[in-house]
Image: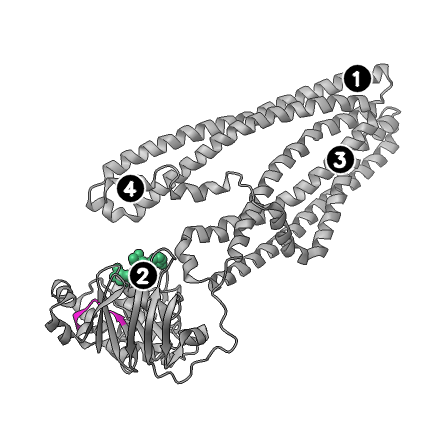
Amino acid sequence: MSEKSTTSSAAPGGMPGSSSGRRFSVEKPKNMGLTMRRLWGYLEKNRLGLFTVVLFILVNTAASLTGSYLLRPLINDYIIPKDVDGLLHMLGIMLVIYLAGATAAYLQSRFMIIISQKTVNEMRNDLFKKLQLLPLQFFDTNSHGELMSRFTNDVDLISESLNNSLTQIFTSVITLSGTFLLMLYISPLLTLVTLVMVPLMLFLASQVIKRSKNYFLAQQKAVGITNGYIEEIITGIKVVKVFGYEEKAETDFEKLNFDLRDKATKAQMFSGMMMPIMINMSTINYALTATIGGVLAVTRGLDIGGLASFLQYSRQFGRPINELSSQLNSLQAALAGAERVFEMMDQLPEPADAENAFKLTNVKGEVRFEGVSFSYSSDKVILHDINLSVKPGHKIAFVGSTGAGKTTIINLLPRFYDIQSGKITIDGIDIKDISRKSLRESMAIVLQDTHLFTGTVMENIRYGRLSATDDEVIHAAELANAHSFITRMPQGYQTTLDGDGSNLSQGQRQLLNIARATVAEAPILILDEATSSIDTRTEKLIDLGLNTLMQGKSTFVIAHRLSTVQNADEIIVLEFGKIVERGTHNDLMSGKGKYYQLYTGQFS
Ligand SMILES: Nc1ncnc2c1ncn2[C@@H]1O[C@H](COP(=O)(O)OP(=O)(O)OP(=O)(O)O)[C@@H](O)[C@H]1O
């Protein structure tokens, strides 16, 4: 590993920081109204539930407001006149009211959790469905991490916000208006005191928040960079050890870590100031209101009960405002998350099949490329005027230096990408007129990067054709030469593979891959030979397995091995997306051209 590559990707603003930092910075949705309407589209299916939640919120806030107000008659009518019976009666009523409020709060939160989980469950389903429909082009241009974060971070943001923010905002607004009206009712003059003090408190709070937010953003960025660095070193640990990079890595890490410590300290200090400031301000407010209230009680006949109720309200007044601003922030973040989710849902899927698309039956496997040109993006043509044909049961091999376009050619057959000009046909039918499902069913693919899914060996092979019986799977494994190693595994075909088959050797993974392609029983075979070297015994097994697999099938192979090219009916030599030579091994060898060079360099 070069020093440069390590440090550059951990530099500020690099990938690692940008995705994880998102959760903490408040990102604004681009089109708030539209996103809200679409979110409502999901929510409105639970109208009855939402209505119930609103009802519970009303009961809860009414109970809390009434409870505080009842202090007034409690003091005026029962405590001051020393009416013990009446006092107990009143306390009983207050108890019932508070209990009703608490029950409503509990039910409201339960209902809302059910609604929000149901909503995000539906969103995740829709998103996953969409994921399966998207063209490969989409995955080329979006990193896996980004896509994953739609499902994790963004959906989490939405569910958190539905759980809390939405109801909190509603509760805060009602509480705030109710409190204000009741305060005004008790004493307009005292309300004025609160109206001066509360904005002052909020202003101070907002100053602290503003400054600490900057520090928090800085902290978050530092966390992202540090994490990115750790991840890079862990994934590249072999390279680190082999090239003796440990010490340099340590020094680099210490620097990043120190920066993180510095920013985290500042962020925590500032946010730590918030609570004491607010508490002190609130105490001052309380004392001031009580003093002025006392004066009013003496001079203007404000009743003591009214004063007690008022003090209660005035203490509560700042809370919903604070609550409101923080919940609005989190709602905003959730809407930005929802927007990203909807953005992905809006991506164009693979174009639908034509209505009268062919369903292939009894495929013979004659494949032709006629004047095919292709580019991934409009600015660079990758394949130029490719013409080739494969007779049923024949094998065509592609060779050429890296980047020549071999993989691109085989990507076109299953229509992972659509060509811009020319025609590709199977048994004379243009693949554009064949339904994608039927087209893809007619071919089996063995790729270099053997992808295994979490599940048993049996399930992994059956991926090739879901309708295959156990016997067919075992038969395919036998043909692919995978049977003997599978039966030596602890639970044979029922052994669970996990983490992309990490408990298997490279060769074993390839054998499973071949078995999977074998069980598909497709007439066309696409093969990207593995370049990684495998011990000769396994290689023989793989060779045998592949030969069995290829029998009677039209095969397209990106060849890396001598035996493959030698057996091919035609070898196509590609250079910068053009066919520069073609013929059998012997033809091309005697031509002493590009193939001869490649051959003597690569396969010797
Ligand atoms: N998904 C993609 N999006 C854009 N360009 C791509 C994409 N895949 C490949 N290319 C470009 O197309 C060209 C041909 O790539 P291709 O993978 O077909 O080459 P290759 O012959 O298979 O190479 P290798 O032997 O290294 O696998 C390269 O220039 C590559 O940069």
Q: Residues within 10 Å of mark 4 (few under 14, many from 20)?
A: some
Magenta-drawn segment? 557-563
Gap between marks 2 and 4, in whole Å?
31 Å
Q: Disc 1 marks which amino acid?
A: Gly
According to the picture, the residue beneath numbered tag 2 turns out to be 382
Give percent across and percent down for residue 587.
Answer: 14, 75
Residue 336 magenta-drawn? no
The quadrant of the picture occupied by the N terminus is: top left
Disc 3 target residue? 177
Amino acid type, label 2: Ile
Contact? badges 1 and 2 (CB < 8 Å): no
Residue 379 seen in this snapshot: yes
504 or 143: nearer the eye?
A: 143
Disc with the residue nearer the chain's start (1 vs 2) = 1
**Counting other residues with Cα less than 10 Å from the Cα at mark 3, is it few (<14), some (14-19), or many (20 or more)?**
few
Q: CA distance from mark 4 to mark 3?
A: 56 Å
- Sequence-wise, the earlier of marks 4 and 3 is 4
Q: Quadrant of residue 308?
A: top right
Q: Is residue 542 left or right of residue 429?
A: left
Residue 287 screen position, x and y as percent: 71, 19
Q: Quadrant of residue 241?
A: top left
Q: Which mark is residue 294?
A: 1
